Image (cartoon, rainbow, N blue to C red):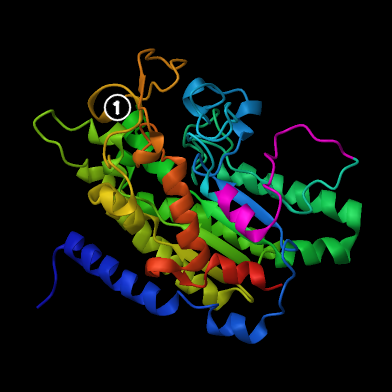
């Protein structure tokens, strides 16, 4: 009998996805990578980072944008840096921990002024911008969109070739790992602004536009040397404190319309990667199930050492979902919890350093069957 319930089909897919990821992951590498792997020395593989506020380490400090898309003020950074760096957390991000595990310097924001005489970009670069989306229209004019991040990467390639020559620069780019987190803002923006873009398309068409732009960028990175990629899928967007609070007071669940878009996106992202692996020579990847990992921690916080899985540490209102952390945003009132490490959520849309470290561990080692077909550790171990 045919299944006429699309959400039922998606739910079934996600179950199968987790099983398949488990079978494919938690090993040193995918089979074809193992057969071609030339072992890399520790710290010899560069890390190039694209995406949004999950990976932005300060690029938005250097652009003309609003405080909604900046985090260079207290209490951001209080748990580790003792000052704000532009990271949207109380401390370090996933990408910071991945760099530590790979024994490479934390890639600096591409927008940060640099000494042209230094070996910039040899160990990597961070192109990510808080608020960025796959679509140019997402928070347009206030962020560095994914297409512009790609253009900045091409400038880095040009700089490396001028500095090191074709052979050495191409070797760096070919052996590097490219870490990408994108898509969240393409969907959040439709709930948080007066954007009518989503209403012009069906949900499926809109998701395909987002994935289509990501496909173009991945192909271009591959064309310019990239071979090894790490991706995060999207969390249950409707469960973020900033969207959960949009439900009526008598309804405490997640905003289902937003979570549905994330599920559709994750199906399309998985299909994209399965297809592109077959079509692009040498393309190898690790896909981290950010959705399942975050959902488990929201629903069972104590299992992972947390006390609070739904209410943010910093903000105000229901679930501290009003995006006021720091008091420099339109709403000035905010509270900060006593122990950020006991919270899953740091502010209305972002996570604490503690959960980012747990996730980085899972991405690196492939633990709990959340990464596949390769692990990030395997990608860094091969040239």
| Magenta stretch, overall SS | loop
The answer to whether residue 203 shows anywhere in this view is no
Image: 138 above or below 322: below
Kindly tell me whether residue 322 is visible in this rendering.
yes
Residue range of the region highlighted in magenta in the rendering: 95-116
Left or right relative to 104: residue 164 = right
Q: Is residue 338 left or right of residue 256?
A: right
Q: Nearer the viewer, residue 85 or 244?
A: 85
Q: Which residue does the numbered mark 1 point to in the structure image?
A: 320
Question: Residue drawn 83% across and 48% down?
Answer: 159
Under tag 1, what secondary structure?
helix
Pinpoint residue 359: horizontal percent, then vertical percent: 44, 54
Report the number of discs.
Answer: 1
In the displayed structure image, the side of residue 254 where residue 161 appears, left or right: right
Front position in the image: 174 or 147: 174
- Look at the picture and state if 130 lies above or below 71: below
Farthest residue in the bottom direction?
35
Q: Is residue 313 left or right of residue 300?
A: right
109 magenta-colored: yes
Q: Quadrant of the C terminus?
A: bottom right
């Amino acid at each position: 009998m045919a299944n006429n319930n699309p959400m039922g089909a998606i739910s079934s897919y996600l179950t199968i996805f987790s099983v398949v990821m488990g079978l494919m992951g938690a090993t040193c590498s995918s089979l074809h990578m193992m057969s071609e792997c030339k072992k890399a020395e520790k710290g010899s593989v560069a890390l190039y980072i694209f995406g949004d506020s999950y990976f932005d380490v300060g690029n938005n400090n250097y652009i003309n944008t609003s405080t909604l898309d900046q985090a260079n003020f207290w209490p951001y950074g209080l748990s580790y840096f003792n000052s704000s760096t532009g990271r949207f957390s109380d401390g370090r991000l996933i990408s910071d921990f991945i760099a530590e595990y790979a024994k490479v310097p934390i890639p600096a924001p591409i927008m940060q002024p640099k000494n042209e005489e230094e070996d910039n970009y040899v160990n990597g670069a961070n192109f990510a911008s808080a608020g960025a989306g796959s679509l140019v229209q997402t928070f347009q004019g206030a962020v560095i969109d994914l297409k512009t991040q790609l253009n900045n990467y091409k400038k880095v390639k040009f700089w490396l070739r001028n500095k090191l020559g074709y052979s050495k620069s191409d070797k760096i780019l070919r052996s590097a790992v490219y870490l990408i987190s994108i898509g969240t803002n393409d969907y959040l923006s439709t709930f948080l602004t007066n954007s009518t873009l989503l209403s012009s398309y069906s949900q499926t068409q809109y998701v395909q536009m987002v994935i289509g732009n990501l496909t173009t960028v991945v192909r271009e990175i591959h064309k310019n040397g990239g071979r090894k990629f790490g991706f995060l899928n999207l969390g249950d967007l409707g469960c973020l404190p900033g969207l959960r609070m949009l439900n009526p007071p008598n309804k405490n669940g997640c905003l289902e319309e937003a979570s549905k878009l994330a599920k559709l996106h994750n199906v399309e992202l998985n299909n994209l990667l399965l297809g592109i692996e077959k079509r692009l020579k040498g393309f190898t990847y690790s896909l981290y199930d950010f959705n399942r990992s975050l959902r488990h921690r929201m629903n069972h916080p104590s299992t992972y050492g947390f006390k609070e899985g739904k209410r943010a540490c910093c903000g105000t209102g229901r679930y501290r979902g009003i995006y006021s952390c720091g008091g420099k945003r339109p709403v000035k009132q905010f509270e900060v919890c006593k122990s950020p490490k006991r919270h899953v959520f740091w502010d209305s849309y972002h996570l604490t350093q503690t959960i980012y470290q747990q996730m980085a561990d899972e991405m690196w080692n492939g633990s709990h069957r959340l990464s596949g077909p390769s692990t990030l550790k395997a990608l860094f171990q091969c040239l």
